[in-house]
Structure formats: C-alpha cells, structure tokens
C-alpha cells in the first residue's frame, strides 16, 4: 500500500465522467434484476432480519424500564470517543494519549495497511469502529435475565451488524479502494459494478458474491476426474465405482456417504487434492454416493428414504458387484449423521455388512451445534417450513449464505471488497468452486433433520427417532469407529463431535485435525500442510475421557496429513487382498463417472 500522499493522485476527469455514465447506464439493468426477482425472493431474505428485529425490539422494551446501565455505558462511550477525536486533532499529542483501553485486536486482516496508522482520518475511523464494537457488546453483556439462547442470537446479530459497519467495506472509507479509484478514474468501481450485476443474474437477484472464478473449473474436466463408472441409480443417488490402478486391492471396499448439502466431489477435487484418487492408489476399492439435486418432485422424500435409497441400497449393490460380505462405511458432515442412523438401524434389523465406520466432521449430539444454532428455534423453523411448502425444497444458495455469514470476515467481506470495490476478478480455487456448487434440500427430509436433530436433539435418546418404523439407538453400534474433527471448524465444533463419541459403545479412535470443516478433511500428504492430534492412551482398550479437554491434554501432535494414519487404521481391521475389481466388467454400467446427477446445478 502506498503512503497517503502517494495515494492522492489526480483524478482523470474524462475517464471519471465516462465511468459514471456507464455506471448510470448499468443501473437500469440492476433495477430490472430486482424488479423481476424481488417479489419471489423477498420473503426468504426477510426471514432472518425479521427474527433479529423482533429480538432487539423485545430487549429495548425491556431495558426501557431500567435505563441506568445503558446510560452509564453511553456516557463512557462518548468520553472515549471524544478522547480519540481530540488526540487525532493534534497529531503531536497523539503518542501521549492512552488508547490501550480500546483493546484493538492484533493482526486484524482488515486493517493491516500502514495507512490506518499513518493517516489521522483513517486512524480515527478504525479507532471509533473498534470502540463502537466494544461498547455494543458491553451493552449486550449488561442485560440481565437473558436466557442463553437469546443472548447467543443477539450476539450473532450484533456481531454481524458490526462486521457490516466496518469502514473497510465502503469505498469512501477504505484507503486501498480510494487509491484504486483515483488512479483508474473510477474504473475499479465500474468493473466492480459489472461483477455485482453478474452475481445478481447468476443468483436470481440475491447478492451472493463469487469467491472463485467459476469459468476455470468444470466437473468431469478438471474436477471429479478420477476414472470410474456409475453402476446404479435411483431417485436419490447414483452409485460410482472407481477403477483400480494397482495390481491387487484390499478385500474390503470403502463406501463414501457425502453430504447432500453440497456435491460429492469435495472428496474428488482436482487430482492433487483428491482423497478418492489417493485411496485408489493405495489399493482400496472405492464407491461413492452421488446425491441428486432435488426438485419439487422429490419434496416427499423423507430422512429415512435417504437411508433406504442411499447407503442401504448401495450396500446391496456393492456386496454383489465386489463379491464381498462387508464394507468400510465413511460419512462426511450430515452424511456421517446419516451413517450413524443407518448403523443403528442395521443393528436393529440384524444387518452385519460393515467392518468399520468413519465419521468426518459429523454431529451425533446436537446439544451444542455452535453458531449455526442461532438459526434454530421453533419460530424460525416454522417460518422456513411455510416457505419450503410452496417450492418443495430449500434453495441451496440460502444455506450457503447462512454458513458464510457465520464467518463474514473470512467468507463474505474480503470477496465483496475484492470483487465489487476493487473491481478485481475472482481467483481460481477448486475448493471454493465446490463451495459455490450448491444443492437444494428436499422439504420433508430437511424439516425432519432440523427438528429431530438440531432442535430437539432426539438422536442421542434411545428410541428417540424411528426410521422405517424402527426405533434406533446409537448405543447399539458395536463396530470399530473412527471420528475426525477439526480444531477451527465453525460448522461442526470439535468438542460437539467429541460429545457424540460418548453415545456409542464401541472401540473408538478420535483424531483432531488442524484447520476447519473442509481443509481439515482435504489435506493431501503431498502438501504436508496441516497436522493432526491423536491419543494412544484411549480408544482401543480404554474408553475416551468424558471431557474433550482431558483428551486434548494428553494427546500427541503429528505433522502432515491424517490420511495415512486413517488408512492404517482401516487396514488394522482387515488387510486381506484380492484381484482388482474393474467396474468396466460390470453389466449394469449406466455412464462414466462423475455421472449426470452431480452436473445438475441450481
């Protein structure tokens, strides 16, 4: 970043005039986009904002009866505000002013540019922003008689509003944007406006900023290209069998149950990031469920249908095609929750076709779902159910937006600034392309999942959930199980995943990876980027400790990927080898991998 004086280059008047003319012309397109899409999208967009408004109104009316604490906070806030103002009026005395009490966060990526300290104007913006944020949260903490849920929801809404107010998000308060605007005659704003219009068209009038270049990748061309065949399909799934590359293979195949919130190829990204490709190269026979992107015709599909037509139907096909009697089953995220339900159901129905189970970033105990819990209460689910009844599904882009605003300073605002204010193109990144390739959620399945798992946490109760008229109990699961969690996962908190381990009465291996919900899983050994933790004192012959902090305290840190550690764990349960199973020899081949279900976009 240049110094403030270097940034103030003369604005080229003709270029600025041409830019403004073009922006005004494009504004007409913006009006058309909203005119055509707003009537149908408005109810969905207002769902969360209405809920937040109701909460704040309730609290303000409550505080009106006892305003003393609020008045005290306002007085201190104004004193500190004018202290900053006075100090920055006279830069000579600035160093003598005590500003440590404002607790400026260290290494806030939004304010790394030197100009935020060199310029009194930008220093003032930054300091007063931090001051506002601090005392807004102090106000929340001063409110008494708030239940834990309401306080959590209010904290979320306040924090998101404060993130929205950050000066970096506005072109007249962001020094990098101001510099770019002056140097280009406003071309950055014009390019950013064009980027914004493209996103609005792509998302039917919703502002869902692109995080990556969508034109760089294509499923089946440079993503999801591990060779294989689709050997079965029904209304909900296509089943992929991958082609072997070794002279022999391990006898027990692996079945992946990916989340149906996104596409399966998170496990088969570009070749250097593909877990599927790596497993095939190690000698495993790999099968993958590819979930359909549901439309209104599948609104009636229930959670139990996803079990019956997903993993259970897949087991029927795999045991026949691989000529085997048992399988390693792996579930990722919600796929792991379904796996646990399936295993408990199988135990009740005396089905023993599994050697081991692996749960990656999967919740079984929903008592502490993390920040996503702010979206979960009866009024919000009722409102969502009414909206879904008309369409038969939840639009996947809405769920993406919900996850992104849980971490707005990582998953929204940086891309907003880069794409719209600086007018730069998005950089290609396979993982972010997958993140944008959303899937809809079938109406009855999703409402069942929200109510029974997130809202009432019935999965942890013996017989709390019935699937296909069979009451299930997670304590019935007896096969060896491997749990993977990640330290900074904000979608499925690692301590919440750990609490689910205690619901099973079987040998358990618990592994804690570095990074988050996705990077904690997709961590190829060749990159040697993130490490992981294990605890050899527990799991094999001893039960895991009751508290996650006790497990962590005596754990061992390892460098590199967890993939090889997991593969060795799988082989500890069966390492026999057989001749390769080539899906090309299967008489029921429907099409080449990745199949057609994964190509269906919203």
Image (cartoon, rainbow, N blue to C red):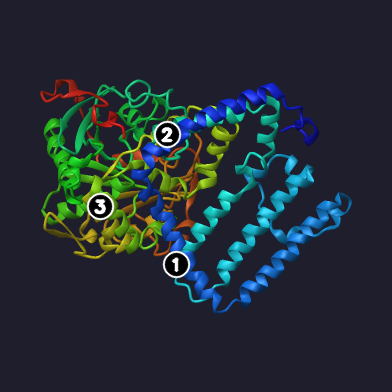
Q: Which residue is mark 2?
A: 32
Q: Which residue is mark 1?
A: 150
Considering only order in the chain, which callout, 3 or 2, is on the residue closer to the N terminus? 2
At x 48%, y 67%, the residue is 57
In the figure, 166 relative to 422: above or below?
Answer: below
* Closer mark to the observer between disc 2 and disc 3: 2
At x 23%, y 61%, the residue is 475
Tag 2–tag 3 contact (CB < 8 Å) = no
At x 32%, y 43%, the residue is 395
Q: Which residue is mark 3?
A: 340
Characterize the local packing of mark 1: few (<14), some (14-19) or many (20 or more) Cα atoms within 10 angstroms.
few
- Residue 595 appears at what percent x and percent y? 24, 27
The alpha-carbon separation of the residues under discs 2 and 3 comes to: 48 Å
- Please tell me in which quadrant of the rendered image residue 223 appears: top left
The alpha-carbon separation of the residues under discs 2 and 1 comes to: 39 Å
Pick the front one: 336 or 498: 336
Would residue 505 be found to the left or right of residue 552 on screen?
left
Q: Quadrant of the N terminus?
A: top right
In the figure, 456 relative to 45: above or below?
Answer: below
SS category of the residue bearing label 1: helix
SS category of the residue bearing label 2: helix
Considering only order in the chain, which callout, 1 or 2, is on the residue closer to the N terminus? 2
Tally the numbered discs: 3
Would residue 94 be found to the left or right of residue 181 on screen?
right
Q: Quadrant of the C terminus?
A: top left
Characterize the local packing of mark 3: few (<14), some (14-19) or many (20 or more) Cα atoms within 10 angstroms.
many
- Residue 590 appears at what percent x and percent y? 16, 24
The alpha-carbon separation of the residues under discs 1 and 3 comes to: 31 Å
In the figure, 184 relative to 348: above or below?
Answer: above
* Closer mark to the observer between disc 2 and disc 1: 2
- Residue 584 appears at what percent x and percent y? 18, 20
């Amino acid at each position: 970043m240049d110094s403030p004086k270097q940034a103030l280059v003369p604005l080229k008047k003709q270029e600025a005039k041409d830019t403004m003319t073009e922006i005004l012309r494009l504004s007409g397109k913006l009006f058309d986009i909203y005119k055509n899409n707003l009537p149908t999208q408005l109810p969905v967009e207002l769902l969360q904002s209405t809920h937040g408004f109701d909460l704040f109104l309730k609290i303000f009316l409550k505080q009106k009866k006892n305003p003393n604490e609020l008045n005290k906070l306002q007085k201190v806030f104004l004193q500190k505000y004018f202290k900053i103002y006075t100090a920055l009026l006279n830069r000579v005395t600035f160093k003598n002013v005590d500003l440590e009490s404002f607790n400026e966060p260290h290494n806030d990526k939004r304010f790394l540019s030197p100009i935020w300290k060199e310029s009194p104007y930008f220093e003032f913006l930054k300091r007063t922003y931090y001051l506002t944020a601090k005392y807004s949260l102090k106000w929340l903490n001063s409110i008494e008689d708030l239940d834990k849920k309401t306080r959590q929801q209010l904290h979320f809404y306040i924090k998101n509003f404060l993130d929205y107010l950050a000066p970096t998000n506005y072109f007249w308060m962001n020094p990098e944007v101001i510099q770019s605007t002056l140097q280009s005659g406003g071309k950055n704003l014009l390019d950013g406006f064009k980027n914004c219009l493209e996103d609005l068209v792509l998302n039917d009038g919703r502002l869902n900023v692109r995080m990556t270049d969508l034109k760089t990748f294509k499923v089946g061309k440079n993503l999801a290209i591990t060779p294989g065949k689709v050997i079965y399909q029904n209304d909900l799934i296509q089943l992929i069998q991958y082609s072997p590359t070794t002279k022999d293979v391990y006898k027990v195949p692996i079945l992946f149950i990916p989340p149906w919130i996104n596409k399966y190829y998170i496990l088969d990204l570009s070749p250097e990031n593909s877990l599927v490709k790596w497993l095939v190269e190690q000698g495993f026979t790999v099968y993958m469920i590819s979930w359909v992107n549901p439309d209104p015709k599948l609104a009636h599909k229930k959670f139990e249908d996803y079990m019956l037509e997903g993993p259970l139907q897949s087991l029927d096909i795999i045991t026949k095609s691989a000529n085997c009697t048992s399988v390693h089953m792996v579930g990722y995220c919600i796929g792991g929750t379904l796996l646990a339900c399936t295993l408990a159901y199988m135990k009740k129905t005396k089905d023993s076709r599994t050697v081991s189970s692996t749960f990656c970033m999967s919740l079984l105990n929903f008592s502490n779902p993390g920040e996503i819990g702010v979206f979960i209460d009866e009024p919000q689910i009722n409102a969502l159910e009414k909206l879904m009844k008309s369409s038969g599904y939840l639009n996947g882009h809405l769920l993406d937006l919900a996850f992104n605003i849980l971490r707005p300073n990582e998953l929204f605002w940086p891309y907003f600034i880069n794409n719209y204010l600086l007018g730069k193109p998005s950089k290609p990144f396979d993982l972010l392309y997958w993140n944008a390739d959303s899937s809809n959620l079938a109406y009855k399945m999703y409402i069942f999942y929200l109510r029974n798992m997130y809202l009432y946490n019935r999965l942890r109760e013996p017989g709390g959930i019935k699937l296909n008229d069979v009451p299930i109990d997670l304590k019935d699961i007896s096969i060896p199980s491997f749990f993977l969690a990640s330290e900074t996962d904000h979608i499925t908190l690692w301590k919440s995943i750990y609490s689910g381990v205690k619901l099973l009465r079987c040998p358990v291996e618990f592994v804690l990876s570095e990074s988050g919900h996705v990077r904690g899983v997709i961590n190829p050994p060749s990159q040697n980027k993130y490490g992981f933790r294990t605890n050899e004192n527990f799991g094999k012959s001893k039960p895991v400790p009751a508290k996650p902090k006790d497990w962590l305290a005596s754990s061992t840190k390892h460098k590199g990927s967890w993939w090889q550690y997991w593969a060795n764990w799988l082989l500890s349960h069966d390492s026999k080898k057989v001749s390769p199973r080539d899906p090309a020899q299967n008489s029921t081949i429907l099409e080449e991998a990745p199949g057609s279900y994964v190509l269906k976009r919203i």
